[in-house]
Structures are given as structure tokens and as C-alpha cells.
Amino acid sequence: MRGTLVLGLACLALALAIPLLLAPPSAQEPGASASPDAHYAGADEDISFTALSGGEAVETTMAEWLPGVVAGEMPASFEDEALKAQAVAARTYILSLMTSAKAAHPDAAVCDDPGCCKAHLTDAQMRDNWGDSYEANYAKITSAVHATDGQYLTYEGEAIEAVFHSSSAGMTEDSAEVWNARPYLVSVESPETAEDVPNYVTSVTVSAADFAAKISGAYPEADLSGEPITWLGPVTNDGSGRVESAEIGGVQVPGTELRTLFSLRSTAFTLNYTDSGFLFTVTGYGHGVGMSQYGANQMAKEGADYGEILTHYYTGVTVEPYTAAAMG
């Protein structure tokens, strides 16, 4: 009798276990790590748009496109919380473009040209760049994307222009100094230093002849007669310490224009005349507006989470979950 009872209980246990063994695996939680080949189902899967990849229009989703943007814009070696902040900022930037197409590609929301939209790496490019570290780096990038699934930044209920740059010179730039004023893109402190950032301080030396040629080409009214040392007048700095304008040959030249003319890494520079020519000493890299990527990484090292990083660099914003209704 006891043997029959034991056998019956064993059969019952096996019968209950079989459906569990045959059942498909449950959906992965948003914060979990993913292998490169794992399928992820979340809010990002519901966000679809047209993108230009290598000049070719492709239909894609946020879940497919965003990991390539994060990989193209931020080193995989950065802290997890910095990568999460980058994922939210990049997702927000894409969402904002979905409602206001760029003239350069009116039939596509985004492209992979960092000079137009944001960088984007294909899987093949990631494999080529990372080599043996591909599996680990891809898992780290996708984990940051999944952990922030569908989250984006809003100001007064609207998706913001979540611009970002590589590194700042102690302060970020107010958007009014570069483009149009945005209440959430104002100057704030940024903690990165020369110890944290490769090539944080760089220099560019320009001969007097080349300097004169470029300035005269853009500003023919500039008086560049006399000794080159006399060409330079007062420099005006904005609230972040960057060059707002410099007087050259009696003409006010915007700092942004000098950055373009002489291929400077930022407008946080000093300009002096030396025996070798005109010397620009430049700090940081990029336009300086919005989130500093190296600043975000330093904040993460100091214990800040991605929400704290984002609300520091984008003043007065809210981190919200994506809904189609909210985006109109």
C-alpha cells in the first residue's frame, strides 16, 4: 500500500513538472542583461520610425536602433549609470526628431551621420571596433537600454531636445549662446577634469599668413595691416567661460565662428600671439550644450544614478515612460 502511494505521488509530481519544462521562457525584465542574440520585448519595440543607415532608408524600431546609437556615442567602458543616462538622452533626441523631421532627410526621422543627427554603429561595425570584447560590450550597452526601456525626458509635457557633447570646461554652455534659448538647456557645473578626459586640453597653432587668410576670407572688413600682434583686441567670455566673441582687426568675431574657421574642439579657448604664430589653447570637446558625457561618467563614479545625472544636466525636466498618446 505504502509503495503504491509513493509511486502515485511521484507520478503526480512528474505530471505537474512537465508543463513547466515545456513552457516557453518568461519575458526578460527590463533591467536584466541580455546576450547579443536575445530578443527583448518592451516599450521600445512599439516605437517605430524610418532611419537612414549608410544612406539607405530602413524601417526600424527604437529597440533595434538605440543600442547602435549608445555604442556610437559613448564608450562601452563608461559606468553603467552613465550609459543609462546616454540611452535616455538618445531615446529622447530620437523621439523629438520623430515629430519634426530634418530638412536634410525629410522622409526619415534620423540618420547615422553624427554631423546631422547622432552616430550609429551597425552590428558589423561594433564587432569590428570591439573585437574579442564584442559580447561583453554589447551586453553592457543593451542592458543600459533595457534598464531604461521607453523612458524619455520631458519639459512641461513635451519631449526635449536632449543634446549632449563629449566634455565641458567646468561648466556646460547655455543653448542661447549657440542656438536658440531653451529653459532646460542652461549652463550648469560639470565635474570632469584633465585626469578623467583624454586630450582634455589641446592646442592649435596657426601661422600669421594662414590666420590672416581665414579671417579676411570670412571678414573682409577686418584691418589686418601692421604687426600680427596688433590684430588681437579684447576677448569677451560668456557666463560659462567660453569665448563669446573676440575682436580681430577691429571686427567682433563670434567664438563659434572661430571654432569653425580653425577646427577647434570647443569655444572654451584662449588666443595669444607667439613667435610661432597664433596659439589657441582649447579645453573640452563639443558645443558644450546639454549633458557632458565625461561629466556624466564622473558623476556616476561619484555615486549618482542616471536620473540624477539627467536632471542635473537638463534643468527642470521629468523622466517619463513612453506612451503613444503622450507623443501625440
Image (cartoon, rainbow, N blue to C red):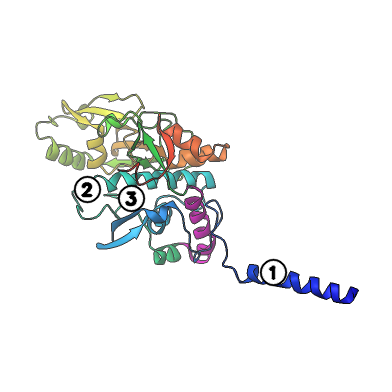
| Among the 4 quarters of the image, the one containing residue 239 | top left
Of the numbered discs 2 and 1, the one sitting upstream in the chain is 1
Q: Relative to 248, is 74 on the left or the right?
A: right
Residue tagged by mark 1?
17
Viewer-proximal residue among 5 and 263: 5
Residue tagged by mark 2?
102
Q: In this view of the protein, can residue 192 be seen by the observer? A: no
Q: CA distance from mark 1 to mark 3?
A: 49 Å
Q: CA distance from mark 2 to mark 3?
A: 13 Å
* Between marks 2 and 1 in the image, the one whose residue lies nearer the viewer: 1
Q: In this view of the protein, can residue 56 be seen by the observer? A: yes
Q: Are marks 1 and 3 in contact (CB under 8 Å)?
A: no
Relative image position of residue 20 (x, y in whole percent)? 64, 67
* Magenta span: chief secondary structure: helix
Query: Is residue 136 in the magenta section?
Result: yes
Pick the quarter of the image with the N terminus.
bottom right
Dot 3 amino acid type: Lys
Secondary structure under the numbered disc 1 in the rendered image: helix
Dot 2 amino acid type: Lys
Secondary structure under the numbered disc 3 in the rendered image: loop
* Residue drawn at (21%, 55%) of the image: 107
| Among the 4 quarters of the image, the one containing residue 311 | top left
Q: Magenta residues? A: 130-148
Residue tagged by mark 3?
118
Relative image position of residue 273 (x, y in whole percent)? 28, 32
Dot 1 amino acid type: Ala
Quick one: which residue is furthest to the front in this view? 1
* Between marks 2 and 3 in the image, the one whose residue lies nearer the viewer: 2
